[in-house]
């Protein structure tokens, strides 16, 4: 586990000011099991997305999107914005977070990994990300401009990046920081659900793009 920790941190440490942290606590405190379960779920979700993209590129059919997916996408994005906004408030106002019965958010928020480049709070970065995702999603739904047809691909790419970054942050909590933030874990789950909800519209764009050369050759 220590070897894996050093490997991951070696990749991402350039994004953060390196501050020595105490070694992670031995054993699992409250919330560690949940964080690890979410971590595994995110990794499996990313693998699923990659497999589905490959299948569609190879010619697999894509079913149409349902209206409930759009409503769920909006609701989850707004919820993610609320959580990220709360974390931004805690991080910028140096206040104590309400953590509930699971984990210790304040230990996570006071760690050096709570700020990107040592300056930008991760909560604020998440808030910007959720706003950008919702904006691009609306751009595609409203059909504003000729390139709006590619908005679903951009949404999938943004949510995929968010999940990958959440995997890194979620890994840090139990294995490096030694504490779990239930708000951060909740945001990671939301971002993963958004990625899965954005998959089908993006696959439809990929399917149409893959079929375009065949239609041209037939014409």
Image (cartoon, rainbow, N blue to C red):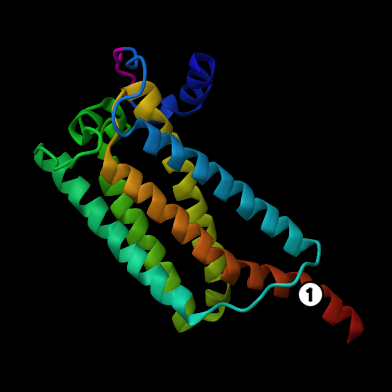
Location of mark 1 (residue): 211
Q: Is residue 144 visible?
A: no
Viewer-side residue, 3 vs 156: 3
Kind of element beneath mark 1: helix
Q: Which residue lies furthest to the bottom in this view?
A: 219
Going by the image, does 11 lie left or right of 202?
left
Quadrant of the frame with the C terminus: bottom right
**Principal secondary structure, stretch drawn in magenta:** loop
Q: What are the residue bounds of the magenta stretch?
A: 18-22
The picture places residue 29, in percent across and down from the top left corner, at 30, 25
Q: Is residue 4 visible?
A: yes
Measured as percent of width and height from the top left, residue 103 is found at 25, 34
Residue at point 82%, 74% (across, down): 213
Residue at (65% x, 52% y) in the render: 50
Q: Where is residue 51 in the image (x, y as percent from the top left)?
A: 69, 53
Given residues 28 and 43, the one toward you in this image is 28
């Amino acid at each position: 586990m220590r070897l894996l920790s050093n490997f991951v941190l070696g990749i991402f440490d350039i994004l953060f000011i390196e501050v020595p942290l105490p070694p992670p606590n031995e054993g699992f405190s409250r919330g560690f099991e949940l964080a690890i379960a979410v971590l595994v779920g995110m990794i499996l979700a990313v693998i699923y997305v990659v497999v589905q993209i490959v299948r569609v590129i190879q010619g697999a059919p894509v079913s149409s999107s349902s209206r409930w997916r759009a409503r769920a996408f909006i609701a989850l994005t707004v919820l993610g914005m609320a959580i990220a906004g709360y974390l931004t408030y805690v991080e910028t106002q140096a206040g104590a977070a309400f953590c509930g019965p699971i984990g210790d958010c304040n230990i996570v928020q006071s760690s050096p990994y709570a700020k990107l480049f040592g300056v930008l709070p991760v909560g604020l970065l998440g808030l910007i990300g959720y706003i950008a995702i919702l904006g691009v999603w609306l751009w595609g739904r409203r059909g504003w401009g000729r390139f709006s047809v590619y908005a679903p691909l951009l949404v999938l790419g943004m949510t995929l990046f968010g999940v990958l970054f959440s995997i890194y942050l979620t890994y840090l909590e139990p294995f490096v920081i030694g504490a779990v933030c239930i708000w951060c874990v909740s945001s990671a789950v939301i971002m993963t659900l958004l990625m899965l909800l954005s998959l089908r519209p993006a696959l439809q764009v990929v399917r149409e793009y893959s079929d375009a050369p065949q239609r041209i050759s037939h014409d």
